[in-house]
Image (cartoon, rainbow, N blue to C red):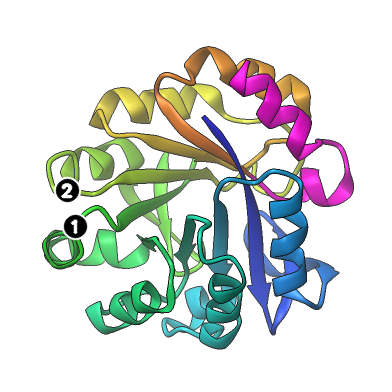
Amino acid sequence: MLIIPAIDLKDGKCVRLKQGRMEDDTVFGDDPVAMATQWVEQGARRLHLVDLNGAFDGVPVHKDVVTAIAKAHPNLPIQLGGGVRSLTTIEHYLTAGLNHIIIGTKALENPEFVDEACKEFPNSIIVGIDAKDGFVATHGWANVTETRATDLAKRFADAGVSSIVYTDIAKDGMMQGVNINETVNLVRACGLPVIASGGVTNMGDIERLKPYREYLLGAITGRAIYEGTLDLATAQAFLDG
């Protein structure tokens, strides 16, 4: 199980939002490449990039920055979400050196697109499921639907996706702990590797997640490692033990 640092990109800077609100951001750096290098030096084995502007606009906004990060760390697995709405965008990012592309909003609106992407780019597609109170949210979390997260996960159980990133919006950026129950329910519903996201705050959260490491590919953390309530190297060593 991996501890995966998140680098959320907004207007070219590294930020963290609270519950996905674009107006409620904290800037942690203006050099995303340097930030990526910082986490790699602390032992990160995978990075999670989010094009926040892209998620809201529906088109990639940070292509150049993302490509620069990939070029700086060519041997590091990198996953990215935000603004991925076409096969052309997926191809661009994979060609630029990324390993996994996360399809979020489009996965709900057009699940056949995920099927097509999995066939075109085997082992490279991750479905991002963001939920509030168990229901899927789309378009940068601006729209909460009537579709249950577990039902959407089941839809892609046999589609060929490499994993699912599950984010509990209520927990994201709030430093209030992980919603383990909902995350485990999702794992059981779809049988796919799941990456937990939202609420990882300190070693207590890592300790609570460890018993489920058989089911979890990783846990994404952002604000906690930026503000120092969680040490990346310590957390990864604990999970490896």
Is 226 within the magenta?
Answer: yes
**Residue at the front extreme of this rendering:** 75
Above or below: residue 181 compared with residue 220:
above
> Which residue is drawn at the image coordinates 27% and 60% (left, top)?
107
Q: Quadrant of residue 6?
A: bottom right
Residue designated by label 2: 160
Q: Is residue 48 left or right of residue 111?
A: right
The quadrant of the rendering that contains the C terminus is top right
Among the two numbered marks 1 and 2 on one chain, the one whose residue lies closer to the N terminus? 1
Q: Is residue 162 left or right of residue 207?
A: left
Q: Which mark is residue 122?
A: 1
Which residues, given as a range, are shown in magenta?
Answer: 221-241
Cα separation between marks 1 and 2: 7 Å
Above or below: residue 57 compared with residue 43:
below
Amino acid carrying mark 1 in the image: Pro
Q: Main secondary structure of the magenta part?
A: helix
What x and y, as percent, mark residue 108? 27, 59
> Which residue is drawn at the image coordinates 29% and 67% (left, top)?
106
